[in-house]
Image (cartoon, rainbow, N blue to C red):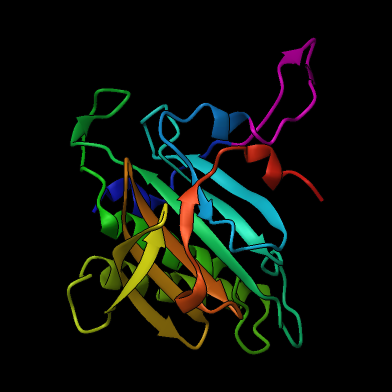
Amino acid sequence: MDATSQAGGATATAGGPVVGGQAGPVDPLVPYLSADFPWYGLDEGWTGRRFLVQAGAGPRTGSVDYGSLGHGEEPAQRYEPRDVRKFAVVVTVARRDSRRSADNTGTLEATSASSAAWLAGSGLLAGTWPGQLDRALRQDWLDQQSSLAWDLADDLAGPGWSTLSLPVNGLPQPFRYRESEYGWVLAGEAPGVLLGAYGRGVSAYGIGFSTVPELAAYTRP
């Protein structure tokens, strides 16, 4: 697994040019459009809302290495007494061979399906508020669960995962899949990239993936 995935990376936020100390208009598509790999989302079988989540770069890489596209309702950012939001988020990870870091201080591992599994698992946890934990206690819980998710992602062939076949650009593709009380996570491969996904309230068994021909669909209300 690419070690940059566990670190979370430096989020490649979209921002306009800075002129005279004032930031220009923010275009959320900027980091997505700068990627050198195709983006994947749910295929045309999904007729609900689509939204951008984030595009990010691993530490010291200087380029966009992964990103997520959302479908349905955006996961809660704070505690809700009865969180019934339904969503599915697709994580696209660039295929990267082992390479030198941008600052030439070390070597970064190659990305793998485990990288996609980790990013999907941590994404699901970030949108989860178990019980009535306050913000401080939730951070402790999140750190603990993220460590467990890392271990699980590093063992995709292990008993914690099952196999699920889903269409990618219309062709069946095997994925590793697992469910928990917080939702589901899956990871696998697609032409040119590695794919992960996570969701809740949306059945993983009924979804399919495809390349995204027009990212503007993810910026509409």
State the residue at coordinates (49%, 68%): 198
The magenta segment: 13-29
Give the number of marks.
0
State the residue at coordinates (55%, 36%): 12
Name the foreground residue: 215 vs 197: 215
Residue 28 within the magenta-colored segment of the rendering: yes
Query: Is 119 located above or below residue 139 in the figure?
Result: above
Is residue 74 toward the left or the right of residue 61 in the image? right
Magenta stretch, main secondary structure class? loop
Q: Quadrant of residue 217?
A: top right
Measured as percent of width and height from the top left, residue 146 is found at 41, 69
Query: Is 24 located above or below residue 121 in the figure?
Result: above
Measured as percent of width and height from the top left, residue 3 is found at 27, 49
Query: Is 173 located above or below residue 184 in the figure?
Result: above
In the displayed orientation, state which residue is furthest to the top: 20
Q: Quadrant of residue 151?
A: bottom left
Residue 106 visible in image: no
State the residue at coordinates (75%, 30%): 26
Is residue 172 toward the left or the right of residue 62 in the image? left
Q: Quarter of the image for the N terminus: give it.
A: bottom left
Q: Quadrant of residue 135?
A: bottom right
State the residue at coordinates (71%, 63%): 48
Is residue 87 toward the left or the right of residue 185 in the image? right
Measured as percent of width and height from the top left, residue 203 is found at 53, 79
Name the foreground residue: 212 vs 171: 171
Name the foreground residue: 4 vs 40: 40
Residue 98 within the magenta-colored segment of the rendering: no
Residue 99 visible in image: yes
Measured as percent of width and height from the top left, residue 52 is found at 65, 48
Name the foreground residue: 132 vs 149: 149
